[in-house]
Amino acid sequence: MQNEKTFVIIKPDGVQRTLIGEIIRRYERMGLKMVALKMLVPTAEMAERHYTLDPEWLRKVGEKSIASYKAKNIPAPSDDPITLGKKVLTRLVKFVTSGPVVAMVWQGAHAVGIVRKMTGGTEPLSSDIGTIRGDFVLDSYQIADVSDRAIRNLVHASGSVAEAENEIKLWFKPEEILNYRLIQDAILYDVNLDGILE
């Protein structure tokens, strides 16, 4: 379990707001270990491949969006999940390719769940205070829809171990993912804390 990996992108809004260090600091302080890092401007093809690695993504994101609108008593722009999913995809691709992003792989026990919890819900408006999105973003689905743009929520974080594995393979070559030891690994995972005292 301690070797579970997850994939994170600091999106163009996080880079432009100079929050790279703050976001990395939060994951590091939790005890996660960064094992891969690169900064790039994704192509439209790369961004679209990222979001559609799961063939059901369009439908799922459309259904999730519709449910979110209903929960807030706001009419959804469409009742068809695929139509709404395609609209979301177009906005996301435009957003993610608008400037530099920071792609990372984090490793540690329950890495996927921990990163998702620390990052907060997809919509910053409904994210808890104490999460990255809850602390640093004022955006909402409603504002994004009125502006016909993707929601600005700083970070993408894998939603499952399988999703993380697929995203990591898309963004990183195997040799770009490092295997190294931190002193904190002993504190977090060594049963007997051997080697702490000299």
Image (cartoon, rainbow, N blue to C red):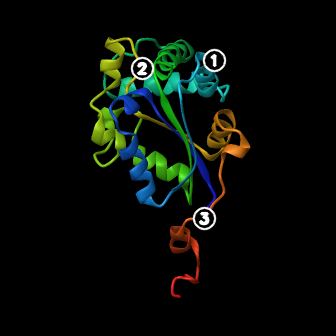
Which circle, 1 or 2, is nearer the viewer?
1
Q: Is residue 116 visible?
A: yes
Q: In which quarter of the image is the N terminus?
A: bottom right
**Residue 110 vertical position relative to residue 121 in the rendered view, above or below:** below
The residue located at (66%, 38%) in the rendering is 172
Closer to the chain start, of discs 1 and 2, is 1
Q: Residues within 10 Å of mark 1 (few under 14, many from 20)?
A: few
Calculate the distance from the C-alpha at mark 2 to the C-alpha at mark 3.
38 Å
Closer to the chain start, of discs 3 and 1, is 1
Q: Residue 181 carries which label?
A: 3
Calculate the distance from the C-alpha at mark 1 to the C-alpha at mark 2.
17 Å
State the residue position of label 2: 150
Closer to the chain start, of discs 2 and 3, is 2
Q: Position of residue 191 (x, y in %)?
A: 58, 79
- The local secondary structure at tag 2 comes to loop
Q: Which residue lies furthest to the bottom in this view?
A: 198
Foreground of the two, 85 or 51 = 51
Q: What residue type is labelled 3?
A: Arg
Q: Which amino acid does label 2 sit on?
A: Ala
- The local secondary structure at tag 1 comes to helix
Q: Position of residue 196 (x, y in %)?
A: 52, 82
**Residue 155 vertical position relative to residue 115 in the rendered view, above or below:** above
Calculate the distance from the C-alpha at mark 3 to the C-alpha at mark 1.
35 Å
Q: Where, by quadrant of the figure, is residue 138 drawn?
A: top left
Which circle, 3 or 1, is nearer the viewer?
3
Q: Where, by quadrant of the figure, is residue 171 drawn?
A: top right
